[in-house]
Amino acid sequence: MVTLTESFSLVVYDVVNDRIRHRISEACLDFGLERFQMSAFWGYLSATRRKDLFDQMRELLGQHPGRILIQPVGAEDFQRRLVLHQKAEKEAEKEKPAKKHREFGEPGKERPSIVKL
C-alpha cells in the first residue's frame, strides 16, 4: 500500500564485487523494491526509507569500488515513462518451450506466481 509520504524511487547500482552486489540486491528486495534489470530496482519508498536503504547500501559497499543511485521520481514523470522489453533473437531461440519469461509489472502490483512445469 502506497502512502502519501512515499514516492516512486529508482535504485541503480554498479558494483564490481559479486558478493557485495548480491547483498545489495537482497537489501533492495528487503525494502520491498522490484527488480527490473540485473542491478536496477523500482518501487515506493518514503524519504526516511530511501535514506535508510542508501545507508545500508553504502555500508555494504564499504571501501570497494562501485556506484549507487537512489532517485525519487514524481508521479507525473512516472506516468510518462517509456519502457521497451525485447529479447535478443539468439536468446529467444535457445529458450525451451516449458520456460516462461517473467514480465515485470507495475511496482506495487501483485507479482506473478512462479509455475514449475
Image (cartoon, rainbow, N blue to C red):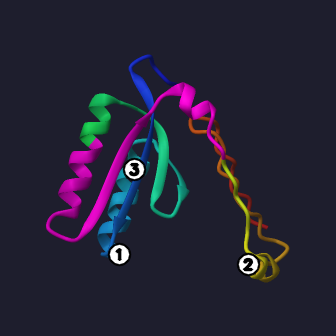
Mark toward the viewer: 2 or 1: 2
Taking the spot 29% from the left edge, 44% from the top edge, the residue there is: 53
Above or below residue 1? Residue 65 is below
Q: Earlier in the sequence, mark 3 or mark 2?
A: 3
Taking the spot 69% from the left edge, 56% from the top edge, the residue there is: 114
In the image, which disc is placed on residue 84? none
The residue indicated by pointer 3 is 28
Secondary structure of the residue carrying tag 1 is: helix
x, y percentage for residue 104? 65, 50
Horizontal side, residue 117 vs residue 67: left or right: right
x, y percentage for residue 41? 48, 50
Above or below residue 90? Residue 5 is above
Instruction: Check disc 1 and give the amino acid type.
Output: Asp
**Contact, CB < 8 Å: mark 3 with mark 1?**
no
Instruction: Check disc 2 and give the amino acid type.
Output: Glu
Horizontal side, residue 80 vs residue 42: left or right: right
Instruction: Check disc 3 and give the amino acid type.
Output: Cys
- Range drawn in magenta: 53-82
Q: Earlier in the sequence, mark 2 or mark 1?
A: 1
